[in-house]
């Protein structure tokens, strides 16, 4: 009989005591020209790489506890919990693949995006030096690794999305998107005769089930799926990734879509794929769906698949200038 591991994360006080950010650090949001995001973003990366969000941990534990004790599914999910405890305690990456690094920055008027981009890139270089991130940025054709997670040609990595908003706070969200789960993402163009999917919600459902069946365990299931209905080939995929940032225990603001998400998650968990494809009832932790406008001639369903090691985090510089991490 295997031991049932309890998630035992270090306290927030211990996390704070290991911070690279001095306790006295404070931004002056009235003078955004003086703002330097390098240290707070480095701290965000340190936390994100070694500590899974609580909602993901809760979903993994719930999945494990619903599996038959001693089964491969139970043991695999139990090992994931053990992995979570070790990484958090030792501040080491949750997985050897620390993913592609994607940022979403929301900021008030007056922030220089050029300066912020430079600072965020420097934070990624620092996190790579500290071995919180693996150098994951290689030249496509030669396979040569840049060594510091920087795309030296066109600055495509790390990917940074900026949005100006009306609020005074600054919010930086990050996702470490594993390569294995990225490989099993999929985009469908409806109608799709091969899977019998038309341009309606039933067709969307068929696309999602098809993508998960094709992925099997190769996206390191149980997965979290972001699904964009509509958009174009670029905006659909972008939106599908952003949807993975939503916490698992939050409802879709559209009640109909919320019901669709819940039903679909239950259905995916009857496929028998299970954690890492070893069989079982825990194939998906959640599905997040959003509808976008589209060109009348095009109907895309874009699906991003996030592995169990769903590393995401948000750093907010509050109105009083203090940073907070979630
Ligand atoms: S898909 Fe996720 S869990 Fe699997 S190897 Fe990549 S980062 Fe790690």
Image (cartoon, rainbow, N blue to C red):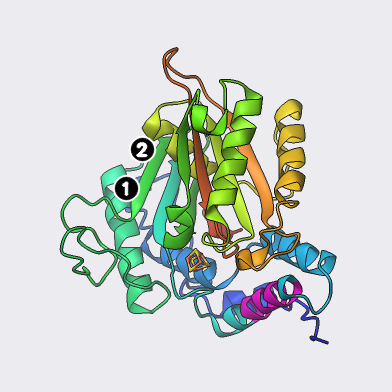
Mark 1 surroundings within 10 Å by alpha-carbon count, few (fewer than 14), some (14 through 19), many (20 or more)? few
Q: Percent x, y for residue 123?
A: 35, 65
Mark 2 surroundings within 10 Å by alpha-carbon count, few (fewer than 14), some (14 through 19), many (20 or more)? few
Q: Percent x, y for residue 133?
A: 40, 71
User: Is residue 115 shown above or below 123?
Assistant: above
Mark 2 residue's CB less than 8 Å from ligand 1:
no
Q: What element carries label 2?
A: loop
Number of dots carrying numbers = 2
Which quadrant of the structure image shows residue 180?
Answer: bottom left
Residue drawn 84% across the image and 71% down it: 68
Q: In the depicted view, which residue is nearer to us: 103 or 57?
A: 57
Q: Mark 1 points at which residue?
A: 33
Residue drawn 36% across the image and 38% down it: 110
Q: In the depicted view, which residue is nearer to us: 33 or 75?
A: 75
Q: What stretch is highlighted in magenta?
A: 74-85
Q: Earlier in the sequence, mark 2 or mark 1?
A: 1
The reply to whether the magenta stretch includes residue 17 is: no
Q: Is mark 1 on a helix, strand or loop?
A: helix
Is label 2 in contact with label 1 (beta carbons under 8 Å)?
A: yes
Q: Name the residue under label 2.
A: 110
* Quadrant of the frame with the C terminus: bottom right
As measured in the structure, the alpha-carbon distance from the residue carrying label 2 to the one carrying label 1 is 8 Å
Which quadrant of the structure image shows residue 88?
Answer: bottom right
Residue drawn 77% across the image and 81% down it: 5
Q: For residue 15, which numbered disc appears in the image? A: none
Q: Percent x, y for residue 261?
A: 71, 38
Q: Is residue 128 left or right of residue 294?
A: left
């Amino acid at each position: 009989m295997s031991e049932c591991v309890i998630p035992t994360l270090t306290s927030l006080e211990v996390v704070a005591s290991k911070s690279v950010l001095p306790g006295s650090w404070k931004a002056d949001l009235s003078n955004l020209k003086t703002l330097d995001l390098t240290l707070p973003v480095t701290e965000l990366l340190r936390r994100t790489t070694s500590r899974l969000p609580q909602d993901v941990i809760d979903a993994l534990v719930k999945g494990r506890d619903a599996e038959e004790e001693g089964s491969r599914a139970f043991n695999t999910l139990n090992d994931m919990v053990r992995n979570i405890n070790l990484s958090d305690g030792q501040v080491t990456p949750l997985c050897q693949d620390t993913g592609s690094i994607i940022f979403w920055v929301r900021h008030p008027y007056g922030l220089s995006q050029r300066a912020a981009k430079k600072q965020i890139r420097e934070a990624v270089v620092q996190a790579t030096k500290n071995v919180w991130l693996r150098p994951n940025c290689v030249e496509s054709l030669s396979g040569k690794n840049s060594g510091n997670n920087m795309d030296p040609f066109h600055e495509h990595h790390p990917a940074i999305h900026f949005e100006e908003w009306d609020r005074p706070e600054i919010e930086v969200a990050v996702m470490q998107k594993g390569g294995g789960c990225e490989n099993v993402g999929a985009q469908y163009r409806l109608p799709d005769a091969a899977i019998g999917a038309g341009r309606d919600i039933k067709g969307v459902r068929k696309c999602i089930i098809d993508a998960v069946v094709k992925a099997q365990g190769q996206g390191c299931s149980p997965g979290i799926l972001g699904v964009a209905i509509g958009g174009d080939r670029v905006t659909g995929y972008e939106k599908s990734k952003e949807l993975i940032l939503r916490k698992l225990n939050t409802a879709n603001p559209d009640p109909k879509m919320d019901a669709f998400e819940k039903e679909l998650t239950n259905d995916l968990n009857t496929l028998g794929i299970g954690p890492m494809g070893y069989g079982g009832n825990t194939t998906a932790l959640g599905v997040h769906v959003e509808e976008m406008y589209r060109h009348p001639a095009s109907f895309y369903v874009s699906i991003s698949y996030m592995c169990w090691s769903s590393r995401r985090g948000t750093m907010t510089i509050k109105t009083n200038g203090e940073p907070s991490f979630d």
